[in-house]
Image: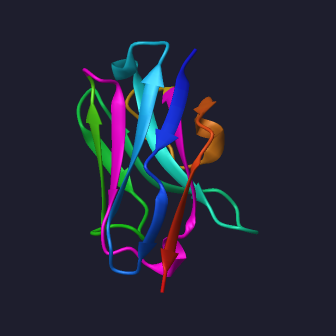
Amino acid sequence: QVHLVESGGGLVQAGGSLRVSCAASGRTFGSYVVAWFRQAPKKEREFVAGINPDDGNTAFADSVKGRFTISADNAREMVYLQMNNLKPEDTAVYYCAATVSAGIIGTGTPWYDYWGQGTQVTVSS
C-alpha cells in the first residue's frame, strides 16, 4: 500500500514557474513508477509526466515537453514536477499517481493503483 500526498500548488501568472511535490509513504519508493496527471474542469484526467525512480527514466506529454521536468529523491521518497513557462491551459488539479511496474511508465489512468488527493494549479493570463 502506498499513500501519496501532493503539495505546492497555487496561483501563478502566465510565463511563471511552480513546483509541485509528491510525498510517498508505505512501501519502498524505488519499486514504483510515479506519474503526474492533471484534470481541468469538464475534461478528462490526462498524463503529464512520469518517472522510474530506479533508473531515472522519464516520459512527458507533448504539451509539456521542454517546459516541465520531473525528478525523484529516493531517500526522501519524493517526486517533484517543476513547471516552467506556465500557460493558462496548464490550469488544473494535479494528481500524483504510483504503481508497481517493471519500469514501464504508463500514460493511462488505469495503469496506476495509487493516487493522491490532488493540488490545484491556476495560471492567470
Residue 22 drawn above or below residue 12 = above
- Left/right placement of residue 120 relative to residue 8 reads right
Relative vertical location of residue 66 with respect to residue 24 in this rendering, above or below:
below
| Res 102 quadrant in image | top left
User: Which residue occupies the foreground of this view, 51 or 18?
Assistant: 18
Please give the name of the residue rendered at 58% of the width and 14% of the height, measured from the top-left corner.
1
Q: Nearer the viewer, residue 112 or 88?
A: 88
Q: Position of residue 98 (x, y in %)?
A: 51, 32
How far across and how far down the image is residue 27, in percent?
A: 46, 12
Residue appearing at x 43%, y 30% in the figure:
23
Q: Is residue 90 magenta?
A: yes
Magenta run includes residue 84: yes
* Residue 40, horizontal then vertical, whole percent: 65, 66
The structure residue drawn at horizontal position 52% and vertical position 33%, both measured from the top left corner, is: 5
Q: Which residues are magenta?
A: 75-99
Task: Tell me: 94 left or right of 109.
Answer: left
- Which of the 4 image quadrants contains residue 112? top right
